[in-house]
Image (spheres, rainbow, N blue to C red):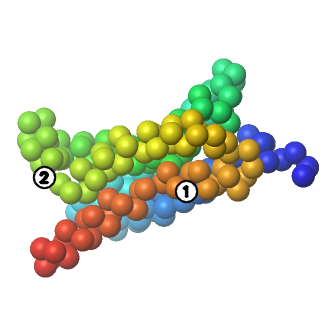
């Protein structure tokens, strides 16, 4: 009603909380683990990656707006993708670096990576979500209100899938 539904600052806040809320909590977990001095784990590396990936969409969003990209149209479909999944991309990279330190070679990393259900689920999400967002925009969806902005980002935020896959696999193995 007052014109704030397309406010870049409002959309930044809505997208950050709806797309990155769990990353903030996972980052706090990683910081806590580091201060407790426990052994470095994949979960901690994953959390650090999510924390470092937090600011990437802010840069992409402001650069796109300054470049004149219509962030509400088809050509802006990638913006909610990065808000929803930049933390997932960071976690995936951080997980790969953790495996590199552990395995020593990139061949060893690839062998471990393709057998790690959480990493494979993460990669699947990173690759498939942009197609869904693009199709959504092609079919006419536009985040012209803060509610639509939050809805679009929440639907794209499938970061909960890899931990659920990890939980399921551990449960299945009886760990």
Residue 100: percent from the left, percent from the top?
17, 42
Up-down: is 2 above or below 79? below
Residue 65, labelled with which disc? none
Up-down: is 170 above or below 101? below
Residue that appears at 59% across and 28% down: 75
In this figure, which residue is indicated by the disc labeled 1? 154
In this figure, which residue is indicated by the disc labeled 2? 115
Distance in Å between CA atoms under marks 1 and 2:
28 Å
Extreme-front residue of the structure: 139
Closer to the camera, 67 or 128? 128
Q: Is residue 122 visible?
A: yes
Secondary structure type for disc 1: helix
Extreme-top residue of the structure: 67
Q: Are marks 1 and 2 in contact (CB under 8 Å)?
A: no
Residue that appears at 19% across and 71% down: 170
Q: Is residue 16 visible?
A: no
Would residue 53 be found to the left or right of residue 63 on screen?
Answer: left
Would residue 20 be found to the left or right of residue 43 on screen?
Answer: right
Residue that appears at 26% across and 70% down: 167
Residue 84: percent from the left, percent from the top?
50, 49
Characterize the local packing of mark 1: few (<14), some (14-19) or many (20 or more) Cα atoms within 10 angstroms.
Answer: many
Secondary structure type for disc 2: loop
Closer to the camera, 4 or 145? 145
Up-down: is 69 above or below 16? above
The image quadrant of residue 76 is top right
Q: Nearer the viewer, mark 1 or mark 2?
A: 1
The image quadrant of residue 93 is top left
Among the two numbered marks 1 and 2 on one chain, the one whose residue lies closer to the N terminus = 2
Would residue 12 be found to the left or right of residue 28 on screen?
Answer: right
Residue 31: percent from the left, percent from the top?
41, 60
| Quadrant of the rendering where the C terminus is positioned | bottom left
């Amino acid at each position: 009603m007052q014109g704030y539904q397309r406010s870049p600052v409002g959309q930044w806040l809505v997208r950050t909380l709806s797309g990155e809320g769990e990353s903030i909590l996972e980052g706090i977990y990683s910081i806590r683990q580091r201060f407790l001095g426990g052994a470095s784990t994949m979960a901690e590396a994953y959390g650090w990656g999510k924390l470092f990936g937090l600011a990437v969409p802010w840069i992409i969003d402001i650069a796109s707006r300054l470049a004149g990209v219509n962030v509400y149209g088809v050509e802006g479909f990638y913006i909610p993708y990065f808000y929803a999944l930049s933390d997932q991309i960071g976690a995936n990279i951080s997980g790969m670096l953790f495996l590199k330190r552990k395995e020593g070679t990139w061949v060893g990393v690839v062998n471990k990576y393709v057998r790690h259900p959480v990493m494979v689920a993460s990669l699947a999400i990173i690759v498939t979500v942009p197609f869904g967002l693009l199709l959504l925009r092609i079919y006419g969806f536009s985040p012209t209100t803060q509610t639509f902005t939050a809805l679009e980002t929440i639907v794209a935020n499938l970061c909960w899938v890899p931990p659920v896959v990890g939980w399921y696999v551990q449960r299945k193995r009886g760990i």
